[in-house]
Image (spheres, rainbow, N blue to C red):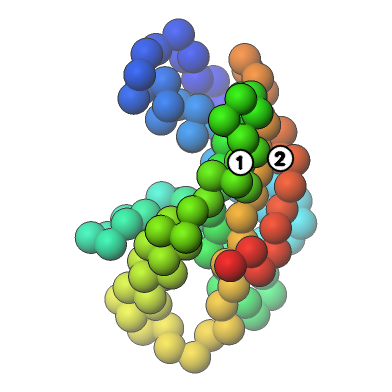
Amino acid sequence: MWYDMKTRGKDQRKAKGAMGEDAAALFLETLGYRILDRNWRCRSGEIDLIARQEHILVFIEVRSRSSSKYGTPAESVTPRKITQVRQTAAVYLHMNGIGDAPIRFDMISVRLSDETAVVTDHFIDAF
């Protein structure tokens, strides 16, 4: 997928985020995951990717960086973000009537360059 990286500010950040999420989704699909939802939102927040790996429902936080100037993608996941993702996942489970499925929270790091996005790490059961 092509993204116009010449945009500025919030639009550029969104384009980079979408590029990272596309790379993460493709990576997961090659491992046999089935992507169920992307950018699922409710009042409590957003979950980047929701997938199924065999019988496990996996909530995935995708973090992308084009440099390590401000730290690694994994270092950008704060305790506040973890709480927000967990709360949002609880809403997703409730709204979809899923009460007894085993769940897991993963994090995927993506390195961005001008026109490419490469998954660098997949943290299984990250939080």
Under mark 2, the amino acid is Val
Q: Is residue 48 above or below residue 89?
A: above
Quadrant where the N terminus lies? top right
**12 or 71, which lies in front?**
71
Of all residues, the one furthest to the bottom in this rendering is 100
Residue to which mark 1 is pinned: 73
Q: Is residue 88 above or below residue 31?
A: below
Residue 64 is drawn in which quadrant? top right
Say which residue appears at 64% left-offset and 80% top-offset.
55
The answer to whether the residue labelled 2 contacts the one labelled 1, judged by CB atoms less than 8 Å apart, is: no
Percent position of residue 73, x then y = 61, 41
Residue 26 lies left or right of residue 82; in this view the side is right
Q: Is residue 115 above or below residue 1?
A: above
* Residue 56 shows in the view: yes
Q: Is residue 53 above or below residue 11?
A: below
The secondary structure type at the circle numbered 2 is strand
Q: CA distance from mark 2 to mark 1?
A: 11 Å
Percent position of residue 69, x then y = 61, 25
Say which residue appears at 49% left-offset and 91% top-offset.
100
Of all residues, the one furthest to the left in this rendering is 43
**36 or 56, which lies in front?**
56
Percent position of residue 124, x then y = 70, 64
The secondary structure type at the circle numbered 1 is loop
Residue to which mark 2 is pinned: 119
